[in-house]
Image (cartoon, rainbow, N blue to C red):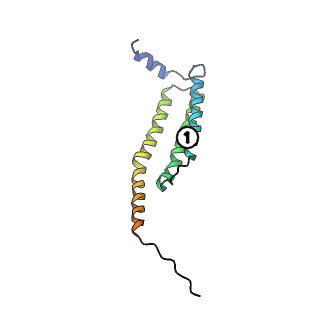
Amino acid sequence: MPIDLAHILQRITDQFNSESRFYWPFVIGVFVAMVANTVWYYWRTGTRPSPAETSVRPWAYWVNIIVLIWVLVLAVAKVPFYWYIVSFVIDVAILVYVYVFYLPPRDAAWGRELRRLKYIPKAERRKRRR
């Protein structure tokens, strides 16, 4: 079956309404994404994350949650499907910026600080005079 570009473009610009067979799986998927995002946010690993990761994680979490709530609002408003695509592209762009450009320099600085602290002698405990 050949790919009909006009049909795809027409489907993308149509309203995404509750009569569509993809509406409820989409809504359920958004709620599953919210739960998965919350589990990721509260998940504790065996190692302690760097302060940079600790400061970035809430931003990533709330950006995702706000975009998912926005997508549910768009679903209720029955807007064309391309608005969903635009919303998810903005979400992914923010997350890529945070984890590719913002976090690595701060994480590297934290690693340098840890290596620097290894060479600084620790203060000895003073014995108390009686």
Residue 87 in the image: above or below residue 3: below
Q: Residues within 10 Å of mark 1 (few under 14, many from 20)?
A: some
Residue 89 in picture, x, y percent from top left:
45, 35
Disc tally is 1
Indicate left or right for 24 with 123 as reference.
Answer: right
Indicate left or right for 68 with 89 as reference.
Answer: right
User: Which amino acid, by three-letter code, is at mark 1?
Assistant: Asn
Residue 130 in picture, x, y percent from top left:
59, 88
Q: Where does label 1 land, which residue?
A: 37
Q: Farthest residue to the bottom: give it.
A: 130
Residue at 51% in and 47% down: 59
Residue 110 in the image: above or below residue 89: below
**In which quadrant of the rendered view does residue 79 lie?**
top right
**Image quadrant occupied by the N terminus:** top left
Residue 12 in picture, x, y percent from top left:
47, 22
Residue at 49% in and 50% down: 56
Residue 10 in the image: above or below residue 115: above
Q: Secondary structure at mark 1?
A: helix
